[in-house]
Amino acid sequence: MSIEQRPRRCGGWLERLIQHARVRSPWLLHFDCGSCNGCDIEVLACLTPLYDVERFGIVNVGNPLHADLLLVTGTVNRRNARVLANLYRQMAAPKKVVAIGACGLSGGIFREADNVIGGIDRIIPVDCYVPGCPPRPEAIIDGVMRVLERFGTGHPKEDVAKGKGIP
Amino acid sequence: MRRAVIPFGPQHPVLPEPLQLKLSLKDEVVVEALPALGYVHRGLESLATKRDFHQMVQVCERVCGICSVLHAICYCQGIEEIMGIAVPDRARYLRVIWGELLRLHSHLLWMGLFADSLGFESLFMQLWRIREQVLDIQEATTGNRVISGVIRIGGVCRDIDDAQRGWIQTTLAAVDRAVRQIAPVLREDFTICARTVGKGILSAEKARELGAVGPVLRASGIAQDIRQTGYAAYGELDFNPVIETAGDCHARCMVRLGEIHQSIDLIGQALARLPQGAIRNPVHGKPTGETVMRVEQPRGEVLYYLRADGGKTLARMHIRTPTFANVPVLIDLLPGLGLADVPVVVLSIDPCISCLER
Amino acid sequence: MSDLILRGVAGLLAGPLLGGLTSGLDRILTARLQARQGPPLQQPYYDVVKLLAKELVVVNAWQAFCVYSHLFATVLAVVLFALQADLLLILFTEAVGAVFLVMGAMASTSPYSQIGAHRELLQILVYEPLLFLVAIGIYLETGSFRLTAVFQWPVPLITQLPLLFGVLCLVLVIKLRKSPFDLSAATHAHQELVRGLFTDFSGPLLGLIEIAHWYETVLMLAFCGLFWAGGLLPMTTLALAAVMGVILMDNATARLNWRWLLGYGWLAGMTLSLINLIWHFRGAG
């Protein structure tokens, strides 16, 4: 599996232990940012017996203060942009963001609608994009796993994007 | 205790969707509930003037991912009425099958979330496990798990072959058995009854007055189901609206439980009588005229108003969704409830915020 | 003396070792009961290490103080148990720890946290008297509050005080935050208060609360074990049986509200304890 193949960062045993724990225990926060529900129910389906992401230690905590991963579905509009930025700010470092579905990537089918700003990355930095309308649960799990690899290697880019779209 | 205001949402684990309820509490009892909307508003109706009327089928499906096929059916029926297109018999039956599959998975999904709002996590897991079988049928017949994209103006674009028919029947029989096994828990379990019986009672008069639709209305004892008007192939199938009379959260749950069996039965009937022939009639020209079309969704009656003046795009599209009709009911039910009952009552109307705000 | 130190160290280690494993076992069993595979057994350790290494966000200085006090008091209670001290002293220490957690939650302004704290206080009001009734039952049976006497008692207490063991299991349901009485904070955030009591604790502080919860679990299970204190094996068997019962209960019920907790939990607990005590008195008299 891909987690095992990630390049190991040099460091003391404590650092390695922490990295290991971070990869094995991602708590996620799901925010529906104006999606049509298609992606939301697929995110929820990931928690249920057939897909059971608790195998990987993933728990849906529903509280930004506790979460490591932010899963965002849907387009950003002028009202929820602030909520999204706020949730991201409330999360404690290190944190990662996964944008789910065509709408979360670019605005998708609603791109030209009146009240749509666009994809999630207009407001907050995104670490992984999961395409699909809606993406299958397998794709969502794969996206989350790819982000977890980055907990092990990269340095988190914590700066909040300039936020072209925030009203 | 002093009055506390709880911002219930827009991000809250009980609601997968961003509805905000500002709850004023006094000793954990709701005094006032104010909904704050707009978090999912996309301005979808405006797309009707920007996209080709054929493309709008796909947009309508994405008004809401859990009611998708039925939005598309309603839109297509409206356009077909304006343009005077006859839909082939086989397509009408296929629309019924996919519509009822959607109702089936939507109700199972709702029931799981309802159990979750009661703090009954294992029931949530079991119900969603059953639901996966319905999604398997959706995937095998339409190619996608949630948003199917099979409805077209003038018919449908995919067919169900004979081998699939048998397999669908056996899978649905398994779903039926599994739901029957779980039903006593929902109906009689002590803790579930303690949380749902007598909570959020809506009388029949009040339901009419507030304009409730769908299972909320039927749980108050009013037998009104838009499927009775006989659109698609419903006129040729046998069914009666499921009703309950208590009007509380438990009754709403029981109505949906009854409708799960009803949907399985309707799919069985439609599969048995599926006529041979074409699945799609060609569409020529551009629509001119206006119409109102109603369809029964899992959450109740959806209403489409369409106006076209001969162009490539429509001149106006308006959608009145079932949740829009049921929110006044919710606001009426909440005051006087304990905080612990709020998620239960909110979920009992099966709120679909992306439908509500479009 | 060296014996005492050894026992103290054993008590200190019991929390992270036994508590963490119980928590992991709990998650696996719960998942299996829900037709899922569940996380690996060592999952709680991953969670705690990750939490401890997260960025520290303190809403208010009192919060941190209360968490440290909460942890200290619960660890002390377990160590006192390992030293076979006085039962009442252990109970009081444990109660102090529980109250500090409530104070920590009250120190923040979030309404979820506040209401969670109120509910936790109600829970403490329900289970503390019941715990003391259990202790009194043990005293009446063995003639001493000291654990050394309890451990030397020849007959398993469960044969004499079966109803009180039932009461202790009820307390266990509340203490482990399980359905139907997971009012103030559920293990998973699927409730109206998000995570109730824990809403405003994050990162390292939440990790410390989790460790304190392990110690609490060990303490409660050790209490259960007291009812068959004829060595390590019977104690563990009884404690495991109690945990299994609680997990089964958790997966077979919906959450009830605080009226039910007061009306049924408290009333049932009180009645059971009193019946057992009166019956025991008459038997002794």
Image (spheres, coloured by chain):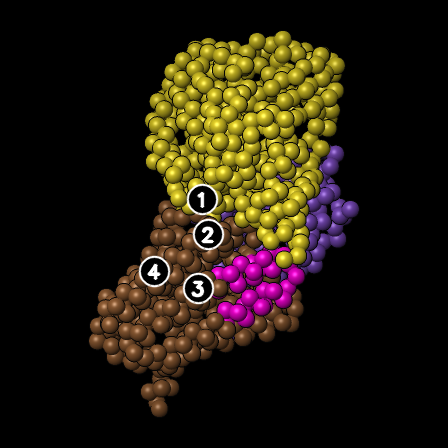
| Tag 4 near tag 1, CB within 8 Å | no
Of the 4 image quadrants, the one containing the C terminus of chain B is top right
Q: Which chain is purple?
A: A
User: Is A113 rendered above or below residue B93?
Assistant: below
Q: Which-is-in-front pick, marks 4 and 3?
A: 4
Disc 3 marks a residue whose amino acid type is Tyr
The residue tagged 4 is C272
Q: Say whether residue C263 is visible.
A: yes
Near-viewer residue (C228 or B333):
B333
Q: Chain of mark 1?
A: B
The residue tagged 2 is C260
Q: Looking at the picture, how far across and down is residue B74, in whole percent?
A: 59, 20
Cα gap from disc 4 to disc 3, whole angstroms: 13 Å
Cα gap from disc 3 to disc 2, whole angstroms: 14 Å
Looking at the image, residue C4 sits to the left or right of residue B196; the answer is left
The residue tagged 3 is C127
